Image (spheres, helix red, strand yellow):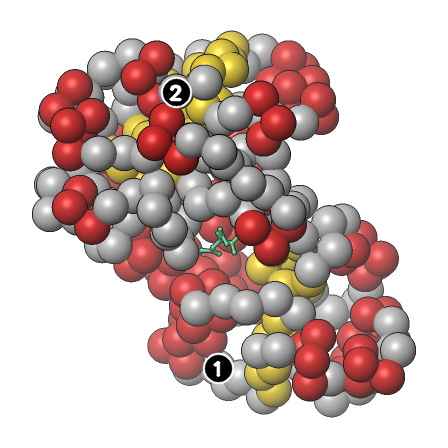
Amino acid sequence: MITFFYEPSTRTRASFEIAMHYLGGQIVFSTENAKEFSSVTKGETLQDTIQVLSNYQPDVFVIRYHQTGGLQALRSHTIPIINAGDGAGEHPSQALLDTYTIYQHTQTLDNLHIAFVGDIKNGRTVSSLSKLLAQYKNTTLYFVAPTHLQTSQDLQKYCHKHKVSYKLLHTIDDLPHDIHAIYMTRTQKERGSHIDDLSLYTLTPQRMQYFSKDTIVLHPLPRNGELPTSIDTDPRAKYLTDQVHNGLLIRMALLYKLLYK
Ligand code: NCD
């Protein structure tokens, strides 16, 4: 496996690499700061870079790219490529682990009510998870964000197409108390996002009292001010435990399915 990351990562790269180790495979080349330390600085295109690395015969690439949709250029590449996040686009393996974490707690993926809070517009995890949840029956999604960071028209169209009912909200306080999961996200500052009043999109212990004992809290991490550490000991908080652990399991399953069949 070759992991090639043009943007910073802790969990995604670590869990893919550890997953491959645990499966008995090897990471033959791994670059964390591809934008700074690879031939990209000399003007090499992504296609050329991956073509060159392909000659070293990996069985799979895991690539994180900084441009939304940029990995589409490699669509017909002969060696499998896993998208580990592309700009503000998609993060499919994160969606798999998030969905599995929800499933562990609800034992179903139908009739779910899930809330996304924060920078909906630029958070790629929200886009991928919404689209995956849309595949199941009677999904209801709540997008809680300031107007300028609300869901894209594309995602809303996707929801319409898949008969997903969704609501656009301006504060966490407008959510129903018996929602199945609250998916918190950080403000994507590196993509130019800014939230004036973060308190509307911050999950406090006081707000947690309002939600049901079965409402789980997820966050793809890293977090900023939107998810204070005072929530961490709440049994409904899954972001530092199950969600992270499932990242390893799901990526092991994904690599196994792809490579060992
Ligand atoms: C996310 C990402 O990189 O998209 N983190 C992750 O992969 N677990 C979330 C983020 O950066 O905000």
Q: Residues within 10 Å of mark 2 (few under 14, many from 20)?
A: some
Question: Residue placed at 37% from the left, 26% from the top?
Answer: 200
- Image spot of residue 58 (x, y percent): 67, 81
Q: Earlier in the sequence, mark 2 or mark 1?
A: 1
Question: Residue placed at 19% from the left, 21% from the top?
Answer: 211
Which one is in front in this view, the residue at disc 2 or the one at disc 1? Answer: 2
149 over 245 or under it: above or below: above
Quadrant where the N terminus is found in the figure? bottom right
Question: Residue placed at 81% from the left, 61% from the top?
Answer: 74
Task: Classify residue 60 by image quadrant.
Answer: bottom right
- Image spot of residue 130 (x, y percent): 52, 30
Residue 1 appears in the figure: no
Residue 213 appears in the figure: yes
Q: Residues within 10 Å of mark 1 (few under 14, many from 20)?
A: some
Q: Is residue 69 left or right of residue 193?
A: right
- Image spot of residue 157 (x, y percent): 69, 18
Which residue has dot 2 on it?
Answer: 171
Label disc, if present, on residue 25 of the rendered structure: 1
Of residue 246 and residue 70, the one placed in the foreground of this image is: 70
SS class, disc 2 = loop
SS class, disc 1 = loop
